[in-house]
Amino acid sequence: MRSSFILPVFLLTIGLLKAQQTPKAEDIAAIKSQCGCHDVSFLYAETFAPDKNYVFKDRYTAKGTELVLVDEQVGPANRPTKLVIQHLLVVGDSMVIKHWREDWEFQNTSLLRFDQNATWKRVKLTPEQAKGQWTQKVFEVDDSPRYEGSATWVHVDGRTYWESTVDAPLPRREYTKRTDYNVMRRTNHHEIRPDGYIHEQDNDKIIRSEAGDQLLASEKGLNTYQRTDDAKCKVAKEWWTKNRAYWVDVRNVWSEVLANRSTVALKGQVKGQVLGRELDELAETTQKATYNSVSSRQLIRQTIEKYLK
């Protein structure tokens, strides 16, 4: 009698452990639903400031066409535990800009948390904290770190969304224009829609110092990705086919560089150059002849290491 009771309990335990290690099919579908050719609009407006004398900045708006694609997945084909998603911006009819990248990792327990002054510190989650969660790791156009947040995909009442709050550097639209704050605390809300998805943001602009964090202003952001005719992204697909090998090497070198660092600190400039420009120039140089991954990776590493403090 006792053995007949133990066996079902044992099998149930094994089943629960396996469920913890296997991502939900609907989570993977949601992440992949963010891919495709999109008409994108970017809207930001400051909404609140504790100082009544604060002068609100002008609203920011922009539009574009963006190709979002799954470039790599790790794990079983039907239940991957990591998806690498690349964004490519189409300008006009023929110009393509390698845009940002996001890696989604299931039950990841190691994250880089932004501190300030282009510095990130590694933090650990316990397996219990990471259970069922997906980490979204966001990278700059040069594949350097930006921010990382972990949360659970929610599927309820006909809605599918993911939301986390993380500290991040100033956004590209402001980091060359403003010095009155040094940390953006972002609440990122990704919600899947039938025709694409929205990336809604509730952001706090923080002044971080030895005295602590002080709120300068809050803002609302709404980025809308509406799926459009794939033909509008044809040039981006062709560009990625031609340039992919080099940029895969860039991200793989970055992964090796970041793997064992408890702190990551980057220099903004080296001898008047910036990392993104140097990597773009290296891309052109290494692809003038038949692409050689081994020699390119060496040059990529040398370039990246110049910018590490």
Image: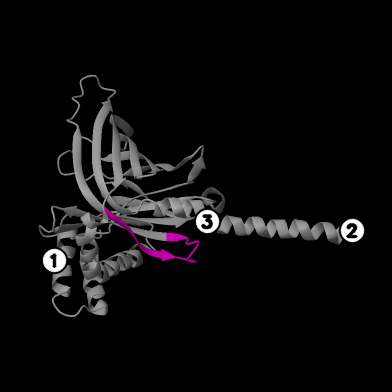
Please determine whether, in this image, residue 283 is positioned above or below residue 276: below
Tag 2: residue type? Met
Disc 1, SS = helix
Residue, disc 2: 1
Task: Indicate left or right for 59 with 184 as reference.
Answer: left
Residue, disc 3: 23
- Please report the bounds of the magenta region as a residue range: 67-82
Q: CA distance from mark 3 to mark 1?
A: 39 Å
Residue 68 magenta: yes
Residue 272 is drawn in which quadrant? bottom left
Task: Indicate left or right for 26 with 257 as reference.
Answer: right
Question: Residue drawn at (47%, 60%), measured in percent from left and top?
Answer: 81
Q: CA distance from mark 2 to mark 1?
A: 73 Å
Q: Nearer the viewer, mark 3 or mark 1?
A: 3
Tag 1: residue type? Glu
Give the residue at the far left of this rendering. Answer: 272
Residue 281 is labelled as: 1
Disc 2, SS = loop
Q: Earlier in the sequence, mark 2 or mark 1?
A: 2
